[in-house]
Image (tube, rainbow, N blue to C red):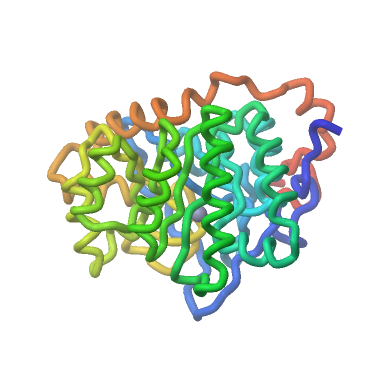
């Protein structure tokens, strides 16, 4: 069946359409923060995970996007990190006009798959999804030396390089996950040849790295942690990055911007991060929003360039999460 909707109808028990549940490692406030004041000029969330339920009363992806629309966040890139979430992302983007999809095997997933002998199968699924309508990016892929020990790194490199080739073959953008691996990520991109539109998701480098990325024409996407008090290096990077290479994201449900750090994050909180960035850059919020929106459409294209498959949506009416018993909007 060419169009299956993995997990969209049922989801995790009690968590709407989500297929994963965020683990709670620390005690934190599980209530969703209030809606911010709406933006005048709307922006896109460059990177979010709406398949992960969070909070005391999790929101379905439709509720998430309705809230986002109400404050001027006009669309999201929904990002997968394994076969299941990549399939979910591609399927959801097909029926949701405010969503485009990115698909990949996350660098922290690659070592276990390699050990199980299934990494190539997983990469083959990503390769196949890359050819689907409304899949506009390969990501998140890259290197993570923070969570993966030495012995897993060969698998990470192999997976990263395979993703770079898939992105180039399909002329898709690429979203990079780089945690404690700046030099190795850059070295790999230069050695293998970066895709034309390469984005560092949740940019975590300093001003020098921002200048290096700028010289290559690589995009830098800032998340809620740019507002954190101890993130002076990120704000210096933000100042050093050319405006035409800036993007903004939530990485929801993680990295909630101030003043709500620790609470569930969602695309509707993107204005808080944007306003924090504009304040730091001493520029007008609407001017920055207009620039970032233009940048985002240059990277991924327009959200309505490939229409949602209406016939397909009708045919799956009974699977519409709004109508399903666990849909959340009911
Ligand atoms: Zn992510």
Q: Is residue 211 left or right of residue 115?
A: left
* Place of residue 283 in the rendered image (x, y in percent of width and height, measured from the top left): 15, 39
Residue drawn at (51%, 58%) of the image: 253
Residue 70 visible in rendering:
yes
Residue drawn at (17%, 48%) of the image: 239
Residue 89: which quarter of the image? top right
**Extreme residue in the right direction:** 1
Determine whether 260 is above or below 86 in the image: below
**Extreme residue in the front direction:** 191
**Extreme residue in the left direction:** 282
Determine whether 34 is above or below 167 in the image: below
Query: Of residues 217 and 321, which is closer to you in this image?
Result: 217
* Place of residue 126 in the rendered image (x, y in percent of width and height, measured from the top left): 66, 42
Query: Of residues 100 and 264, which is closer to you in this image?
Result: 100
Residue 323: which quarter of the image? top right
Residue 17 visible in rendering:
no
For the N terminus, the quadrant is top right
* Place of residue 244 in the rendered image (x, y in percent of width and height, measured from the top left): 26, 32
* Place of residue 138 in the rendered image (x, y in percent of width and height, measured from the top left): 55, 40
Q: Is residue 17 left or right of residue 272?
A: right
Residue drawn at (81%, 38%) of the image: 4
Residue drawn at (41%, 27%) of the image: 297
């Amino acid at each position: 069946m060419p169009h299956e909707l993995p997990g969209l109808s049922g989801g995790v028990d009690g968590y709407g359409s989500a297929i994963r549940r965020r683990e709670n490692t620390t005690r934190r406030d599980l209530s969703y923060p209030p809606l911010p004041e709406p933006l005048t000029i709307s922006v896109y969330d460059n990177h979010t995970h709406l398949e992960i339920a969070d909070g005391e009363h999790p929101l379905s992806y439709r509720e998430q996007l309705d809230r986002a629309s109400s404050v001027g966040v006009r669309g999201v890139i929904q990002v997968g990190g394994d076969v299941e979430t990549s399939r979910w992302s591609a399927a959801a983007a097909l029926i949701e006009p405010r969503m485009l999809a990115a698909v990949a095997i996350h660098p922290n997933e690659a070592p276990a798959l390699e050990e199980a002998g299934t990494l190539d199968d997983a990469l083959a699924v990503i390769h196949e999804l890359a050819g689907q309508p409304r899949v506009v990016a390969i990501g998140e892929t890259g290197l993570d030396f923070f969570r993966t020990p030495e012995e897993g790194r060969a698998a990470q490199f192999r997976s990263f390089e395979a993703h770079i080739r898939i992105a180039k073959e399909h002329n898709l953008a690429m979203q990079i996950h780089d945690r404690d691996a700046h030099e190795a990520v850059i070295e790999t991109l230069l050695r293998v040849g970066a895709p034309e539109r390469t984005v560092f998701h949740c940019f975590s480098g300093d001003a020098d790295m921002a200048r290096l990325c700028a010289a290559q024409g690589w995009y830098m996407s800032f998340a809620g942690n740019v507002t954190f008090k101890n993130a002076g290096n990120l704000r210096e990077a933000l100042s050093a990055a050319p405006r035409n290479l800036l993007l903004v994201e939530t990485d929801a449900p993680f990295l909630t911007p101030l003043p709500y750090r620790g609470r569930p994050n969602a695309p509707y909180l993107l204005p808080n991060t944007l306003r924090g960035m504009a304040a730091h850059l001493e520029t007008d919020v609407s001017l920055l929003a207009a620039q970032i929106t233009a940048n985002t459409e240059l990277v991924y294209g327009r959200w309505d360039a490939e229409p949602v498959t209406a016939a397909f949506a009708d045919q799956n009416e009974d699977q519409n999460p709004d109508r399903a018993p666990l849909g959340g909007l009911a």
